[in-house]
Image (spheres, coloured by chain):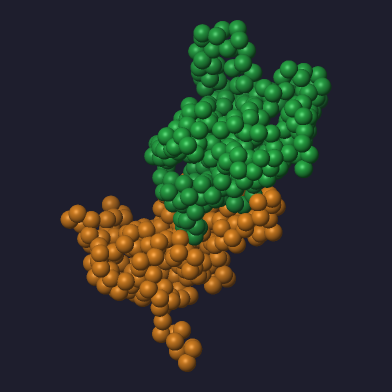
Chain colours: A green, B orange
Amino acid sequence: MTVRSTNHAASPARRGFPARQILTALGVGALILVPLLAPHLQLLMNLALAKGLAVLGVTVVLRAGQVSFGHALFFGISAYAGAFLISAWPGADLLVVLIAGVLGAAISGLLVGLFVARYRGIFFGMLNLAFSMIFWSILEKFYHYTGGADGIRLTRPTVLGMELGRVNYELVLFYLAIALMVGLGWFTLRWLASPSGQLFQTLKTNETRLEYLGLSPRRVLLSGYVLSAVLCGVGGSMMGMTQGVVTPEYVWWVRSAEMVFIAVLGGAGSVRGAFVGALVYEIVRIYASAFAADIWQLLLGVFLLVIILFAPGGIMGIVDSLIGHARSARKILK
Amino acid sequence: MNASRTASVPLLETRNLTIKFGGITAADDVSMRIEAGRNLAIIGPNGAGKTTFLNICTGWIKPRAGQVLFEGEDITPLPPRKIVARGVARAFQIPQLFTEHTALENLLISVSAREGLRNPLRDMHRIRQRDEMMTLLEMVNCADVADRLVVELSEGQRKLIDIAVALALKPRLLLMDEPTSGVASSEKHKVMEILIAALAKANVTSVFVEHDMGIVSRHADEVAVWNTGKVQLRGTPAEILAHPDVIRDVIGEELA
């Protein structure tokens, strides 16, 4: 009998029928059709995908057994870096804005990471929170540079030199978000299964042995931390360009907590779960606030409670067990 | 010139190591030479400072006074990872494994660390060293549980995998803390034989703390008797196990 953990190098799906891959392909296919079949959902989905990219960053850190309550910092730094760039250089290209944001996130991830990589558990979580709130107060107080609570408006960037109308621009952003989800999701899955990703995940179970393999646990944590900051940064840039405005709310602690919330909802540590969680979260949030404006937060809370109590593996845990049931049913029928 | 230098410099040497924990002296002016190519067993009653000695030699604990030299170089101030990088590996009394990984994966992670594998797109299960690690698992009799999570295995199997994880680093010196405790008594000698043969083949010198005098007499080239933070006696297994002090302080205790 072979039992494998969920955060495993070789996913069980590799052997036999690739149910997970097929479901993923169907999901991506459905998203691609959204602008054609359900255009009213396009913006919502776009925001959810941007959030999903950031949640993917939080997910990476979760794989090392650490919870960060401050990853909105990198989300915000990236969005603001893009906003400053566009203010200084109106009509900058979308890709340049994205790259500038990601660079900002990577550099700040490295600097903050050098500091927080010494800590674990509650100290790690709270230090991350502290850094994000320091940045939040800078954004609020340095009004002349940051626009304070009003934030900064982003004029529409050009796309490969073309000035697009609103509809086309939004389509480009939507498909870019899907491409980033697929590309970065794929990369993160591969990285997690690779030697460096596996070493990173040993932080969760045995740092003593890691040290006795000749490696510095801090440096191992730092490598994954920078990756997670970059992923949050990609999400932040996409969010900024999609909404057309960045505000200090981007780094507010509730935003960080929301990312952790979504990661747990989707399946703590699951790459696909980051995006599935973000899509489900946004849909529940929008419909709950439309139909139960006064108690929508209560509904979300109950939703999370139910997940934690009855499906600790999150939405992806439920999907996996359904795939498992289908497999064993098929075996019995054979 | 070179040959005489190699002969005169021991693989590991400690000079005047001293450390106290509260009122207990775990190392009291310990000066010891460990020559390459010989398997040294450390015996002694509980609390004599045997494990502390391994902790100091690998940099986990810093001594209050004294030095540790590996191949003539002072490694006393180095953290464990830098000492490991120089060729000292360690297996633990309580196995230190990655509990969410399988037996084989524990070895793959170890060899990845050794080789500094960084390619983010290469699946760890498909690295070139996989066969080498399977051979290592076979050597410690654990090939049949390669794909099982280590938490599901017996204590004895975990101990052997812990040793294999250390061996995967291709060390020149391997420090083991009670390598066969937890291993079924019928298997102990077989496992030790395989292990000692593998160490000889790979040119690895070993130091092992052991309570089982049967293991010591059959598998050690040399024995050091530890007592209240000091090396009381040192000699061949035959000399040491027949010594009246050892019979009284160590073997007597083991039988009691």
Farthest-out residue, bottom: B1
Q: Quadrant of the N terminus of chain A?
A: top right
Between residues B117 and B125, which one lies in front from this camera angle? B117
Please indicate whether residue B172 sits to the left or right of residue B66 in the image: right
Q: Position of residue B254 (x, y in %)?
A: 31, 55
- Give the image quarter of residue A50: top right
Between residues A223 and B181, which one lies in front from this camera angle? A223
Q: Quadrant of the C terminus of chain A?
A: top right
Q: Position of residue B167 (x, y in %)?
A: 54, 61
Position above or below: B87 against A124: below
What residue lies at 48% left-to-right and 69% top-to-bottom?
B86
Between residues A208 and A222, which one lies in front from this camera angle? A222
Q: Position of residue A64 (x, y in %)?
A: 52, 42
How many marks overall?
Answer: 0
Farthest-out residue, left: B23
Q: Position of residue A70 (x, y in %)?
A: 47, 36
Please indicate whether residue B243 sits to the left or right of residue A236 in the image: left
Position above or below: A256 against B11: above
Between residues B115 and A115, which one lies in front from this camera angle? A115
What residue lies at 68% left-to-right and 42% top-to-bottom?
A92
Please indicate whether residue A71 sits to the left or right of residue A26 in the image: left
Q: Does the image show residue B51?
A: yes
What residue lies at 45% left-to-right and 32% top-to-bottom?
A140
What residue lies at 59% left-to-right and 17% top-to-bottom?
A285
Q: Does the image show residue A209?
A: no
Position above or below: A95 against B49: above
